[in-house]
């Protein structure tokens, strides 16, 4: 029964995050609210008129808000609800379901990357030049890295790996140095003549 309660709390917390993001909306949408459970009736290929393509500065703020919300959720849920001995999925893999939902509903893509700790999934290794550069920048101590290319704003924010994460990500560590992962958030933006990478 205790296992069920912890799992239910964890799922409820994830549901609350998704609900809050859906109800509140993003900063660039002028406080416009959407019905939470309304089914989309637009046909495939038809742009959703309720979504406005943000400017680069709006996209940056949206990405930072999403990053901060997801980072806090990840750390709190991991600390309060995850127990290794209960064989529950780790919080970062549960967030992948949230990412899927946001990608489908908001056209925002998410991807984890390893920075200075072992990746638990080979899909989380930095692959592109952008991802490798972002991992290097975050490993050097910067909190974020961004790029705009072909109408897509990409923001990589650092994700702190607390000690309970390092049991797996750094099983033989000999240092107390802080370790990080990265979360890439990609969303479409209005094209402008701005610097491509920052």
Image (cartoon, rainbow, N blue to C red):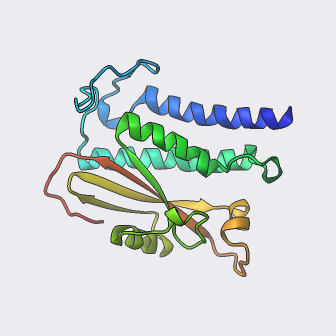
Q: Residue at x 81, y 47 (%)?
A: 86
Q: Nearer the viewer, residue 93 or 19?
A: 93
Q: Can residue 26 be seen by looking at this rendering?
A: no
Question: Which residue is outermost to the bottom?
Answer: 174
Left or right for 51, reference 180? left
Vertical position of residue 181 compared to residue 64: above or below: below
Quadrant in the rendering for residue 136: bottom left
Residue 101 picture location, percent across and down:
46, 37
Q: Quadrant of residue 40?
A: top left
Count the marks: 0
- Residue 39, relative to residue 171: is it above or below? above
The structure residue drawn at horizontal position 60% and vertical position 51%, both measured from the top left corner, is 92
* Of residues 47 and 76, the one drawn nearer to the viewer in this rendering: 47
Farthest residue to the left: give it.
Answer: 193
The spot of residue 105 in percent (x, y) is 39, 33
Which quadrant is home to the N terminus?
top right
Residue found at the very far front of the displayed protein: 44
Q: Which residue is drawn at 29% across and 61% down?
A: 147
Front in this rendered view, residue 97 or 10:
97
197 w.r.t. 9: above or below? below
Residue drawn at point x = 24 percent, y = 39 percent: 53
Instruction: Say whether residue 71 is visible.
Output: yes
Q: Quadrant of the C terminus?
A: bottom left
- Image height of 189 relative to 164, above or below: above
> Is residue 161 shown left or right of residue 87?
left
Judge left or right: residue 194 versus residue 80: left
**x, y percent for residue 156:** 42, 59
């Amino acid at each position: 029964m205790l296992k069920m309660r912890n799992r239910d709390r964890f799922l409820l917390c994830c549901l609350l995050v998704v609900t809050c993001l859906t109800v509140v909306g993003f900063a660039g949408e002028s406080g416009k609210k959407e019905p939470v459970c309304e089914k989309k009736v637009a046909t495939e290929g038809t742009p959703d008129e309720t979504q406005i393509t943000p400017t680069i500065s709006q996209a940056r703020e949206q990405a930072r808000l999403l990053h901060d919300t997801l980072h806090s959720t990840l750390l709190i849920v991991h600390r309060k609800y995850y127990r290794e001995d209960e064989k529950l999925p780790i919080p970062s893999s549960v967030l992948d379901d949230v990412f899927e939902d946001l990608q489908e509903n908001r056209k925002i893509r998410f991807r984890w990357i390893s920075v200075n700790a072992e990746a638990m999934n080979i899909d989380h290794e930095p692959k592109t030049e952008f991802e490798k550069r972002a991992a290097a920048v975050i490993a050097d101590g910067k909190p974020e890295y961004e790029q705009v290319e072909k109408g897509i704003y990409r923001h990589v924010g650092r994700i702190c790996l607390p000690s309970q994460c390092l049991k797996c990500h750094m099983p033989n560590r000999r240092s107390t140095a802080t370790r990080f992962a990265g979360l890439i958030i990609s969303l479409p933006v209005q094209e402008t003549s701005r610097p491509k990478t920052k």
